Amino acid sequence: GKRAGAEARAGEERAEAEAEAAAEKAAEKAEEERLYAERRAEAEARRAAQAALEEERRRAEIERRSALRRRAEDDLASLTARADDLRTRADRVAGRIGWAGGTTRALPAAASSAASASTGAVGSALVRLGEFDLAVAASQVRDRPESSTELVRIAAGGL
C-alpha cells in the first residue's frame, strides 16, 4: 500500500512540475508576444509621426509657394501699371518735343515676369529723370530695345 501511495504522490508531483513548466512556458510566450506587440506599436507610432511631419512640411511648402505666387502676381500687376504709366508719360513728352518715334519700343511691354522685372528696374530709374531727360534717354535706345541696362545707366547719370 505504501508503494502505491508513493507512486501516486510521485505522479502528482510530476504532473505539478509539468503543469508548472507549461505555465512558465506559456508566461514566457505571452511576454514575448507582449514585447513584440509593443515594438510593433512603437514602430507604427513612429511611422505615423513621420507621416504627420511630412504632411505638415508638404502643407507648409504649398503655403509658402502660394504666398510667393501671390506676391509675384501683385508685383507683376504693380510693375505693369507702372510701366504703362511711364509709357504714357514718355509718349506725352516725346510728343511735346516733336519726336515722332513714340517710346513703346524703348520701354519693353510687361508680357512676362522677366520683362516686368526689367521694366520695373528701368521704370523706377526713369521716374527720377526729368521729362526732357526721359525723352532723350528713350530716343537713345529706341533702336536697341534689348538695351534696358543702357536706360538704367543713362538714368543713373551716365548721359
Image: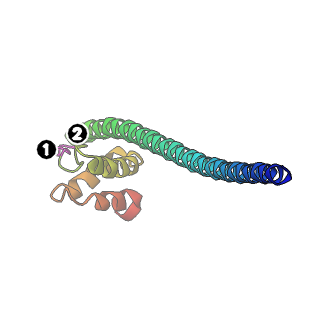
Q: Which residues are magenta?
A: 97-104
Q: Is residue 90 left or right of residue 46?
A: left
For label 2, the SS is helix
**At 35% across and 47% down in the image, what residue appears?**
120
- Give x and y (percent) for residue 7: 78, 53
Residue 100 got which mark? 1
Q: Nearer the viewer, residue 120 or 64?
A: 64
- Give x and y (percent) for residue 118: 32, 52
Q: Check residue 37 for magenta coloring.
A: no
Residue 127, picture quadrant: top left
**At 42% across and 39% down in the image, what residue appears?**
71
Q: Is residue 92 left or right of residue 101?
A: right
- Give x and y (percent) for residue 43: 57, 50
Q: Which residue is mark 2?
A: 91
Colour convention of the picture: rainbow
Residue 78, picture quadrant: top left
